[in-house]
Amino acid sequence: MKGFSVFLRGTAMFALLAAGITLSACEEEGPVEKVGEAVDKAVESTKEAVSNAVDATKEAVNDAVESTEETTEEGMEEADKAAEEVKEDVKEAGEDAKESADDAMKDAEEAGEKATDSAK
């Protein structure tokens, strides 16, 4: 039994030594842990950058949509004004043309009457 007791003590000592090494290894960061942390930081930084870019893109798209709506609305108002102006111009041109036609008709009637009077 003495040999078994020595074996148990040796095994216990080895277990304690292994636990001590493992615990001390956990306290000190090795190159793998440092790389892991760097990767974690890079991933987090990339997530933030992508999130910020997505937010900025959404904002820019919303601004563009608003601007387009405003521009379209303003354009429609300008087109309506221009159409009204054209309508008024056409109406005035029509009235002028009627006036000119009436004048021409009067002149023709007068010329006809003069021609009839001089033929008598």
Image (cartoon, grey):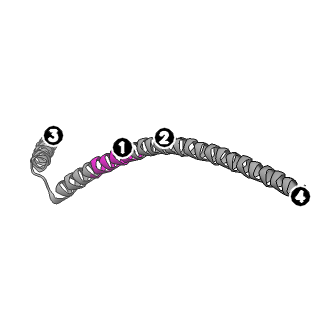
Quadrant that contains the C terminus = bottom right
Could you tell me the amino acid type at mark 4? Ala
Which amino acid type corresponds to the residue marked 2 in the rendered image?
A: Glu
Q: Position of residue 65 (x, y in %)?
A: 44, 44
Q: Please give the name of the residue rendered at 49% of the width and 45% of the height, measured from the top-left corner.
A: 75
Q: Which residues are magenta?
A: 46-61
User: Helix or strand or loop: what does disc 2 sit on?
Assistant: helix
The answer to which of marks 4 and 2 sits earlier in the sequence is 2
Foreground pick, 117 / 17? 117
Going from the N terminus, do you reach mark 4 or mark 1 first? 1
Residue found 37% across the figure and 48% down from its top:
57
For the residues labelled 1 and 3, say whether their Cβ atoms are less than 8 Å apart: no
Separation (CA) of disc 2 from disc 3: 100 Å
Q: Earlier in the sequence, mark 4 or mark 3?
A: 3
Which residue sits at x=64%, y=43%?
91
Q: Which disc number belongs to residue 1? A: 3
Residue in front for this viewpoint, 75 or 81:
81
Instruction: For marks 4 and 3, give the CA distance.
Output: 165 Å
What's the amino acid at mark 3? Met
Quarter location, residue 32: bottom left
Q: How many marks?
A: 4
Comparing labels 2 and 3, the label whose residue is closer to the camera: 2
Q: Circle 1 sits in a helix, a strand or a loop, which is it?
A: helix
Numbered mark located on residue 59 in the image: 1
Determine which residue is flagged by label 2: 73
The one nearer the camera, 100 or 19, is 100
Residue 39 pos. (x, y %): 25, 55
Mark 4 in CB contact with mark 1 (< 8 angstroms): no
Q: Point out residue 48 in the picture as x, y percentages from the top left corner.
A: 28, 47
In the displayed image of the protein, which residue is found farthest to the front? 120
